[in-house]
Amino acid sequence: EVQLLESGGGLVQPGGSLSLSCAASGLSFSSYAMSWVRQAPGKGLEWVSGISGSGVTTYYADSVKGRFTISRDNSENTLYLQMNTLRVDDTAVYYCAKAYGGVSDGKFDYWGQGTMVTVSS
Amino acid sequence: AIRITQSPSSLSASTGDRVTITCRASQGISSYLAWYQQKAGKAPKLLIYAASTLQSGVSSRFSGSGSGTEFTLTISCLQSEDFASYYCQQYYSHPWTFGQGTKVEIK
């Protein structure tokens, strides 16, 4: 059974940094693209960043480009999101999501339970 | 970025009703559209991909149609467990984008 478990969320001041992790199990991790998707309180879903199965290719939403960095360690079956220069509007539940198909697919068939990031002074 | 306009933003319906939700893309996306269901406090669940392909294990009450720029999700006979929020998402080109969501509430 595929399981995705996020960690690393918390309270951080504006301008601060936070690093999220997503531990994956029950799948051939390197075979799948992965993404981070966030949801601000009471709002809809926003795709944040994605990475190919090999880790070579990365993609970002304009709202986080230059501030967030996605990476993965296929030997540890773990996905990461380094978030710098955080803003109040980055406050959200952050989900990691597994791509359904191959290394660059964009639909998501498994999601973690989410980790809450709160940016506030 | 491709904009996805989803409507309505909310609707009230009764058990047994037929419900239709629409998504319009700002440019053609072929059939690269997925639908998700999200219940309060839970992660989204993939219902349909490639505009009309039902994900394994999903009830046949759900169906999707469309291609190009107009897509619909239909719930044929609303059940109590279907009261939730629904999102469409295009995966034709980066950045992947979601519709604003539709909350299906009990009338």
Image (cartoon, coloured by chain):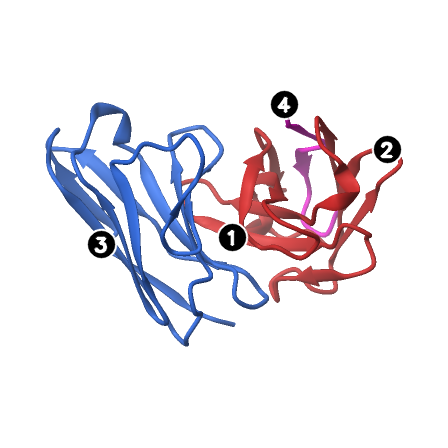
Q: Earlier in the sequence, mark 2 or mark 4?
A: 4
Numbered mark located on residue B63 in the image: none
Name which residue type carries label 2.
Glu
Of badges 2 and 4, nearer the viewer stands 4
Chain in blue on the image = B
Image quadrant in which the N terminus of chain A is located:
top right
Q: Is residue A90 above or below residue B95?
A: above
Q: Which residue is outermost to the bottom?
A: B27
Of badges 4 and 3, nearer the viewer stands 4
Query: Residue at coordinates 57% horizontally, 44% vertically from top-left?
Result: A91
**Residue denoted by label 2:** A76
Identify the hue of chain A: red
**Residue denoted by label 3:** B8
Does dot 1 land on a helix, a strand or a loop?
Answer: strand
Name which residue type carries label 3.
Pro
- Tell if the residue under mark 4 belongs to the same chain as the one under mark 3: no
Numbered mark located on residue A1 in the image: 4
Distance (Cα) linking label 2 and label 3:
43 Å
Task: Give the letter of the chain under mark 2.
Answer: A
- Tell if the residue under mark 3 belongs to the same chain as the one under mark 1: no
Residue A79: image location, x then y, percent: 76, 40
- Within-10-Å neighbours for mark 2: few <14, some 14–19, many 20+: few
The quadrant holding residue B99 is: bottom left
The magenta segment is A1-16
Numbered mark located on residue A46 in the image: 1
Task: Give the letter of the chain under mark 4.
Answer: A
Task: Give the letter of the chain under mark 1.
Answer: A
Query: Residue at coordinates 27% horizontally, 31% vertically from top-left?
Result: B82
- Tell if the residue under mark 2 belongs to the same chain as the one under mark 3: no
**Are the residues tagged 4 and 1 within 8 Å (C-beta)?**
no
